[in-house]
Amino acid sequence: MAEAVARFRNDCVALVGNPVGPLAVAVSGGPDSMALLALAKATGPTIAATVDHRLRSESAVEAAMVARWCRERDIPHATLVPPADWSPRSIQADARRLRYDLLAGWATAEGAKVLLTAHHADDQAETFLMRAGRGSGVSGLGGIRAARPLGGLTLARPLLGWRRAELRAVVDAMGVPFVDDPSNADPRFDRARMRVWLADAPINAAGVALSAAACGEAAAALDTLADLLFAERRRGDGWDVAGLPREMRRRLVTRAILDVRTSTPCEGRFDPATNVESVLDALEDGGKATLAGVLAFVRGGIWHFTAAPPRRSD
């Protein structure tokens, strides 16, 4: 396993350098996250947390298994649970949001600067194909980002170059226990159906993951250009978008909405990945539109964005 540990260490350094403080690892108890935990422990100080969403009766037992394995190896471990009033409407989306909120709060309180999750190449391939089927653009096809800010942390995925089978080999070779979450094979969920299809499809999952990485690099380059244009094309409290391709206009709309929401209290929520096509269409037609509490309109050929008036509660 020395070769696997060295590979993992190099992957981590490439993403986050040599961070101050322990590596914080999100561990569900599945083979992928247990492999991540074992590899992280072999490289240096590590802390771990398991989020028990309390959506399945078995989840407490799985969290206890992780806690026991950590205790036997002097790895500080925490089991994180949702607040008593948590009531998810969309199970997967709301659970994901809760999971990252809990993990970020825990890791920050423990003095960690980096939070690791066990997303790997097969996850990346599944994400790419699912988003392609929904008509995603280059940013969406970039899939799972290798590293991104999460509050005051860096959220990093050092296993994106690893295959699921390689991680299973790690836990087998190191004698690490794991559990298989039945939701991973539940046909109610899009990802589970994609996983089954991809297993038998005449397509190279590793190649798909590489395509996702290429799209991610292209998206990052476009983001850099959009940052420059955001400053260069600013005209007072608006932006001159004349002559810009639609992709650049799209990115400027997203940045402008974020700019308003940063400086002014606005209703609702806004994620940078939110679809802004309706706003873009309205502005290109010379009209106006509201999204996430921000009003966008055209005046004198300049696109303007401001906090929308509060909605009337008749």
Image: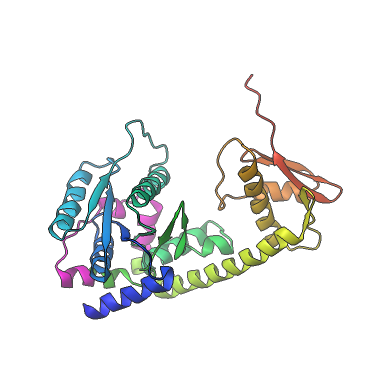
Query: 259 or 62, which is in the foreground?
Result: 259
Is the residue 256 above or below the residue 157 in the image? above
Query: Which quarter of the rendered picture does the N terminus lie within?
Result: bottom left
Query: 266 or 209, which is in the foreground?
Result: 266
In the rendered image, residue 182 lying in the magenta stretch gets the answer yes
Is the residue 293 above or below the residue 75 in the image? above
Res 55 seen here: yes
In the rendered image, residue 215 lying in the magenta stretch gets the answer no
Image position, residue 246 (x, y; %): 71, 60
Region of the chain picked out in magenta, as a range: 169-197
Image position, residue 170 (x, y; %): 22, 71
- Magenta stretch mostly in which secondary structure? helix
Query: Which quarter of the rendered picture does the C terminus lie within?
Result: top right
Image position, residue 239 (x, y; %): 77, 53
- Residue ID at (25%, 48%): 78
Left or right: where does residue 142 sit relative to residue 89? right
Farthest residue, direction bottom: 3
Image position, residue 186 (x, y; %): 31, 51
Query: 246 or 112, which is in the foreground?
Result: 112
